């Protein structure tokens, strides 16, 4: 892990090496299809929305679900292949842009979205307060921010880190996206860093959920089910733009 990455923001795009494999495999794998997605979508079934930003859209699974549920969708991703795959999936039914969430989202108007949804993407960003301020700017009053991320306790324990309260770059190697392992880098941070970034950007937290795998997961992936039922892999947070904030 380079010291530069620990000290300042240097954008990285590790999905370049395995974008297609990621999109194909996560259509039906345990962690996404039978654990993270059902939990995220259960929130959306209970709220009204019209215009939604899918921030870190990968291959556009969420964007497609949202469009099929009558939303106007803008999808963004840093990765060129992911943008192509989402465009293919949506077939002109939404706007798809290549954009880095570390940068200002100047192409999106103030107060123009009901919901920002960001699935398993924010841990690739070191600075959450800046991106949350951008989400806050583009959301309508009382707009919702729904995101999933790595569970802070899991990353701390799994990577045997010394200081839970540090925000630090982790380098990992994933085996499940092809014949050769792929390198991924992301940031781990304590729960308090997540909640204070939200509060400092003008959000109130409505719900924090530690999801559980579905019954289908038990049938299809019993070993993963056991793991996901007993360890906190991902965390989901629903936050709302404070009523009085602009
Ligand atoms: C784990 S995938 C997201 C999964 C996706 N939401 C889904 O389930 O369909 C993470 C995505 O975040 C994107 N990403 C990573 N860093 C980003 C950044 N700085 N700005 C925008 N997208 C980013 C990656 O290219 C990748 O497509």
Image: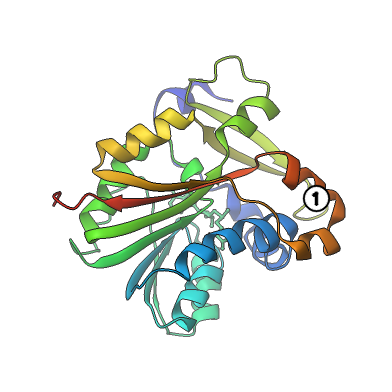
Colour setting: rainbow
Residue marked by disc 1: 224
Where disc 1 sits, the SS reads helix
Q: Is mark 1 within 8 Å of ligand 1?
A: no
Q: Residue at x 27, y 66 (%)?
A: 113
Task: Tell me the crowding category of disc 1: few under 14, some 14 to 19, or many 20 or more residues within 10 angstroms, Cα based.
Answer: some
Q: Residue at x 46, y 81 (%)?
A: 69
In the picture, the quarter occupied by the N terminus is top right
Q: Is residue 196 above or below residue 130?
A: above
Q: Position of residue 52 (x, y in %)?
A: 36, 69
Q: Is residue 151 above or below residue 24?
A: above
Return the residue nearer the eye: 187 or 217: 217
- Would you say 243 lies left or right of 219 here? left
Q: Is residue 71 above or below residue 148?
A: below
Q: Position of residue 35 (x, y in %)?
A: 66, 57
- Would you say 22 lies left or right of 14 here? right
Q: Residue at x 21, y 54 (%)?
A: 137
Q: Residue at x 37, y 39 (%)?
A: 128
Return the residue nearer the eye: 239 or 173: 239
- Would you say 243 lies left or right of 230 here? left
- Would you say 36 lies left or right of 143 here? right
Return the residue nearer the eye: 181 or 237: 237
Q: Position of residue 136 (x, y in %)?
A: 25, 51
**In the image, farthest residue toward the top:** 162
Q: Position of residue 87 (x, y in %)?
A: 49, 76
On the image, which quarter does residue 231 sit in? top right
On the image, which quarter does residue 197 sit in? top left
Q: How many marks?
A: 1
């Amino acid at each position: 892990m380079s010291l530069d990455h620990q000290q300042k923001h240097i954008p990285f795009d590790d999905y370049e090496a395995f974008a297609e494999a990621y999109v194909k495999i996560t259509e039906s794998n345990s962690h996404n299809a039978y654990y993270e997605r059902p939990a995220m979508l259960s929130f959306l079934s209970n709220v009204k929305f019209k215009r939604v930003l899918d921030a870190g859209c990968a291959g556009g699974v969420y964007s497609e679900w949202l469009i099929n549920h009558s939303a106007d969708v803008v999808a963004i991703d840093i990765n060129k292949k992911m943008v192509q795959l989402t465009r293919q999936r949506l077939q002109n039914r939404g706007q798809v842009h290549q954009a880095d969430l570390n940068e200002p989202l100047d192409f999106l108007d103030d107060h123009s979205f009901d919901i920002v949804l960001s699935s398993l993407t924010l841990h690739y960003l070191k600075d959450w307060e800046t991106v949350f301020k951008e989400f806050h700017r583009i959301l309508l009053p009382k707009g919702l921010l729904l995101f999933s991320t790595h569970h802070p306790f899991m990353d701390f324990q799994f990577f045997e880190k010394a200081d839970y309260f540090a925000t630090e770059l982790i380098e990992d190697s994933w085996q499940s996206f092809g014949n050769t392992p792929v390198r991924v880098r992301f940031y781990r941070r304590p729960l308090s860093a997540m909640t204070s970034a939200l509060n400092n950007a003008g959000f109130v937290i409505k719900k924090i959920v530690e999801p559980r795998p579905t019954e289908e997961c038990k049938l299809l992936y019993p070993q993963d089910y056991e793991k996901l039922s007993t360890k906190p892999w991902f965390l989901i947070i629903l936050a709302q733009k404070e009523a009085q904030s602009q």
